[in-house]
Every structure is written in structure tokens, then in C-alpha cells.
Image (spheres, helix red, strand yellow):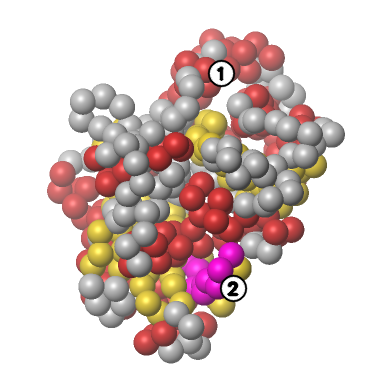
Amino acid sequence: MDTWIGLMSGTSMDGIDAVLVSFQDKTVRIHETHSIPYPENLRQRLVLASQNQATPDEVGELDTLTGTLFADAAESLIRNSGIERSSIRAIGSHGQTLRHQPSGLGRFSLQVGNPSIIAEKTGITTVGDFRSRDMAAGGQGAPLVPAFHQHIFGSETQDRCILNLGGIANITWIPSDQDSSVTGFDTGPANALMDAWCHEQTGRAYDEDGLWAEEGMVDQALLSDMLSDAYFERLPPKSTGKEKFNLEWVKTLVLRHEATRPEDVQRTLLQLSVITAVRQMPQSPTMVVYACGGGTRNRLLMKELALALSPIRVLNTDELGLDAQWVEPTAFAWLAQQTMERKPGNLAEVTGALGPRILGAIYPA
């Protein structure tokens, strides 16, 4: 049986997740997982580049450095798995997004993490640059995971909403009625703003279990200011990233609320993630929400989501047979399979593209 590798680094810019999987119909088998953090210097350079504070030379260097690190992650994954390299059909690498600009005349989505380096160092065919073709066809280039969600998590008896809590939150609405369309879009920030504010104020990369946020209180005036952002009212298709929701966005709003304590800001950011996801979520009597992504490890975030959605059940995708921490890298392994088999990887009704498209560029071994 062919195996596939998925490599992913999201908007949190904290490191690389690698997964080795095989697919059989709608079943995923995870053979091995591996994560490596970005060295702090590299992480800081990536953050600056995402804020347009990098020269072309620096962007080129970041493309090489991250490509090398992605290749190292794949190599460690293969060694740890004990699986023969020859059985690995391809690597799907999302890369690291620096900028995502899905509107305007010069629409683009820029990822670094040179796939040529991954293919060269691993000796395995690599698929990268997944977003460009959808954007060329008039789409947002994001989110791309709903096609995978539909394939793996679709049900004929239960309406399901897959809530991915990465740096940015996105939802995939999968109705049980096969004649109804799947919908999906980015709802706004999930972990990105909480992580950035926590790092700025405490030096910690993230707020473990939401314990620091738990010390604070929601500042309703600040929350109202945050919710007034036009993105939250925009109709799908829509997608966003750190070019929109970043630390400067938070600081600008906090300046209007100088009496708000840092821990109150953190608690308010957590509530922002909850409210923007819940308000934009389709609902039905049979609906169950299945969460995935790094945010599922934030106990307070998951508690507040459950309260906001009650009596709708909120579970993790573990309940559907796929570990919540590995859904997104697995999705890019699946997207690589789609590309190699010349099958579409996007859902045009989600991204707004003119139609289904085979995504990605292939870098042969």
C-alpha cells in the first residue's frame, strides 16, 4: 500500500508538523508523526517577513532555510517510522505562509519552504504550491482542507461542522443531505492573536490550557471594538491570515482601552475566537461540531466553545478516527495524493474558484 507524507506549518509559525499516512477509501491510518519547532531566530525572521519587513534577499533565504527544515522533518519522520522509503509515493508540503492576499488586482498567496529542496534531500517526489491554481481560477486559494473534511468526515445521517482551531479558525459545514453543498471559510483568529499577545506580554510561546486567560475577565468594550472589524460581517467565500489579524491589530485596539489589564486582553481574545466561530457557524437539529487543530489543547477555549454552542455537542475529530492534532498535515498528504492521481483538490463552492482544479506543482524525485 502506498504511503504519503504531509508537512504543515500554520499561521502560528511555531514549527513544522509531519505525518506519514496511508488512505483506504474513507479511512486514514497514521503510521508516524513528528514535530519540530522553528529555531527562535528563524521564527522571528518569518514573523517579520509576514509583516512586510523583509527584502527579496531575505525572502529567498527564508525559502531555502525553511525548505531545508521541512526536508529535515520529513527525514526524521521516515527514520522514526521504519517504513521503506520506496513505499512513500509523495510528500505534500504546504510550506510556511508569509502573506495571503486573496483580493485586489494582484491577488496571491506566498509560501516559503522550497519544495525542490525537499525532493532533493529526501529523494521523494514532492507536491507544493497548492493554493496558486485555485487563485488563478478566481478562488481565494483557501481554505483547502474542506475537500478533505468532506471525503473523510462526511456522514449520511449527521450534519457535521468541522472546526479547525489553528492560528486562524476555519469551519467546514458538511450536511448529511447529499444534495446540499459543503461550505467552508475562515471565521477569523483562533490561536494566532492569543499566542502573539501571550508571547509579547509574558515571553511564553502560548498560554497553556488558557490558564493566563483564566486569570482575566472579558472586557466587553474591547470585545465590541474587535467584533466591529468588517471581516466578520463579510460573506463567504473568504479567507484571512496574519497579514490581517496580527499583534499590531491587537495593540491598535488596546490603545483605546488602556485600563485593560494584559490578562483581560488575553481573555478577551479567547472570547473573540469563540464568538466569531460560533456566530458564523451554520446550525441544524442533528448537527455535531468536531474540533481539530492546536486550539483543542486549550482547555478554556474548548470549555467556552461548548458553553456557547450548548446544547449542540462539541467533540474532537478523535471521535471520527483521526487525531485532532494531525488533521491538517494529513489533509496535505491527501491533497498530494489527489494531485498525483490527477484529481481536483479544491471545492469551488468553498473557495469561489470557477470550478474544480488539480492543485499543486509536482517536483519529481
| Mark sitting earlier along the chain (2/1) | 2
Q: Hey, which quadrant is residue 140 in on the image?
A: top left
| Amino acid type of the residue that numbered disc 1 sits on in the rendered structure | Met
133 or 30: nearer the eye?
A: 133
| Disc 2 versus disc 1: nearer the observer | 2
Q: Residue 136: horizontal and vertical position, in percent?
A: 24, 40
The reply to whether residue 200 is in sight is no
Q: Determine the main secondary structure of the stretch shown in magenta.
A: strand
How far apart marks 2 and 1 lie (CA) works out to: 41 Å
User: Please, what secondary structure does the residue beneath circle 2 have?
Assistant: strand
**Residues in magenta?**
16-26
Q: Is residue 204 above or below residue 230?
A: below
266 or 120: nearer the eye?
A: 120
Q: Residue 9: horizontal and vertical position, in percent?
A: 44, 54
The residue positioned 56% from the left and 52% from the top of the image is 149
The residue positioned 70% from the left and 34% from the top of the image is 213
275 or 132: nearer the eye?
A: 132
The residue positioned 58% from the left and 40% from the top of the image is 179
Task: Name the residue tied to disc 2.
Answer: 29
Q: Residues within 10 Å of mark 2 (few under 14, many from 20)?
A: some
Residue 226's mark? 1
Q: Quadrant of the C terminus?
A: bottom left
The reply to whether residue 283 is in sight is yes
Tell me, yes or no, whether the highlighted magenta stretch contains residue 20: yes
| Amino acid type of the residue that numbered disc 2 sits on in the rendered structure | Arg
The extreme right residue here reads: 311
Residue 326's mark? none
The extreme front residue here reads: 179
Q: Hey, which quadrant is residue 94 in on the image?
A: bottom left
The reply, left or right, for residue 47 in relation to residue 265 is left
User: Please, what secondary structure does the residue beneath circle 1 have?
Assistant: helix
Q: Residue 238: horizontal and vertical position, in percent?
A: 44, 30
